Image (spheres, grey):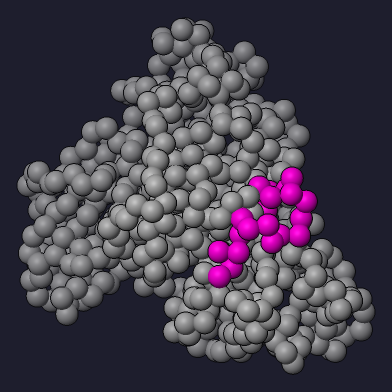
Amino acid sequence: MKIQTLILNLLTFSLISCSSSQKVPFVQKNTPVIFSKVRITDNFWQPRLKTHAAVTLKACINQCENETQRIKNFSIAAGMEQGKFKGFFYDDSDLYKMIEGASYSLMNNPNPELENKLDNIISKIVGAQLKDGYLMTYFILGDLNKRWTDMDKHEMYCCGHLIEAGIAYYNATGKRSLLDVAIKYANHIDSVFGPGKRDWVPGHPEIELALIKLYRVTNENKYLKLANWLLEERGHNKGTWDPADKDYYQDLKPVKELSKISGHAVRAMYLFTGMADLTSITSDTNYIQALDRLWNDVVYTKMYLTGGIGSSRKNEGFTEDYDLPNEEAYCETCASVGMVFWNQRMNMLRGDGKYEDILERSLYNGALAGTSLSGDHFFYVNPLASSGNHHRKPWYGTACCPSQISRLLPSIGNYIYATSNDAVWVNLYIGSETIIPIRGNNIKFIQTTDYPWNGDVQIKIETEQKTPFSVKLRVPGWCKNYSLLVNGKRVNAQNDKQYLLIKRTWKSGDIIQFSMDMPVEVVEADPRVKANIGKRALQRGPIVYCLEECDNPDFVNCRLSKQTTYTSVFNKELLGGVATISATNKDNTYHFVPYYAWDNRKPGKMKVWVDYKE
């Protein structure tokens, strides 16, 4: 197999420096096709969605209902049971995220039993809400006089996840019960905080992006104004934490002035996603300039090859540039999912395939590693090396990551297609079907592919009448060679920001064939990453690979060199079906598997970065 050497381009990159007063013309470039309009059909994601529906949701519900007191706390608060609050103060949020993920599953997989279970849980949430709209079981069952006294007690964070769950369940079932609870809580917050009322800086961003979702559902401008106000509260010495902790809480500077990412990684992702969502509505050029600077900083100085971010366990976040240890890497699963959220929004704003490159890298590696192939064990931390003592668990005391991955997986269809004026954007290559209205016609797109194991993609178009529009195919950053055919004939399409633009009048039965070469790539890190000096990693397509001890008895002595040869073979019997890479030296052959699939067999050592000899 042909070998390519990929050197992470950190040395030649210079950060964009923009004056905050500079006016930049801005129009949102595309809008995603919602996942409820997309049917996944491929052999990679479809089995995972089935496992999610059959196993993951049940595991999360069992943990919330039987193994922990997350649901019972609401029952007690509603007067349905006796007892005291148990758990962490932010535990309500895990239940909300579980409901959100279950709602997404219901949209494409109707399940009366699951819906009835959710209705029962929601009745307890409804009963727990106070008359003034406030809802947080930690304070309702504790000292209610202490509510809204500590900015780091996650009250608005929990409300944000409640809003997202309420919207999801309403969209899935048409039932307003949970949505009305979320609206009532949002109205309570709006009555207490805002211009001329109380100041507040949420210790954990999340409500900002949720309020914008609520604005889009209700068309109530007050939610948009509240989201904007909360973003603007940051960086003005209004937070109640120690000044030394401002960066941890994303409170170091006014958000429009940010240029370097710091502090807690998940909080940063939610904050930036909220800023991007607000920009998509208000066209605030100051926000998008700040987001550009921040994206450049994290991607080119603080991101792992897997798309994981947040190298430090101490602050669950960032340290100095190029500080990317392997075995000590934190790389919280929630942060990788946050990278998916944020980069989708950046692509919506900029229409540039480079954001989809990062989304794809985070999705297939950093985020997907967060759940086992069986669907009932989870990683909170995702290191790039292990001495054999790091394993997934059924649940965590702080269970944000299991519930987070539970809501990402069933919404995967959100990230495949997008639309703009008379154009359809194909952002990810996932076997799927969708119907998109264009110029008054319903155009069906049928995508067939074995991606990520194979770079061949076919898109068939079905339409009742000929329709002129453009198709924009993303060319992944890892792809160096490709071919493009329409109805068997070569097409020389314009490449615009990593998208091939095919503009024509389409008729039913037209077929696009897009074939991307997918060789093994030998990756060299930027030399400023001290942990990877003298090492290399392997990648093929969007998949990052690792070496597991169970496949390699000579694990400790593995070396790659210029003389190493590489072959890739698909093994349908291994790890649910994966393409493996064999690296052959003169005296030995080493076997690599996808990073996301590690720790699904025998316990043992693992590493992504391997010693390399020139």
Is residue 196 among what the camera can see?
yes
Task: Find the magenta span and give its range.
Answer: 229-249
Work out whether residue 96 can be spotted: no
**Residue drawn where x is 37% and y is 58% of the image:** 285
Towards the viewer: 442 or 16: 16
Residue 99 belongs to the span the image colors magenta: no
Q: Nearer the viewer, residue 590 or 477?
A: 477
- Residue 278: x and y, percent? 45, 66
Figure quadrant of residue 444: bottom left
* Residue at 32% across, 55% down: 23
The answer to whether residue 82 is left or right of residue 548 is right
User: Does the stretch in magenta take in 245?
Assistant: yes
Whether 463 is drawn above or below 239: the answer is below
Above or below, 122 relative to 131: above
Where is residue 231 drawn, in percent x and y? 56, 64
Residue in front for this viewpoint, 452 or 17: 17
At 60% from the left and 76% from the top, the residue drawn is 195
Please name the predominant secondary structure of the magenta segment in the image: loop
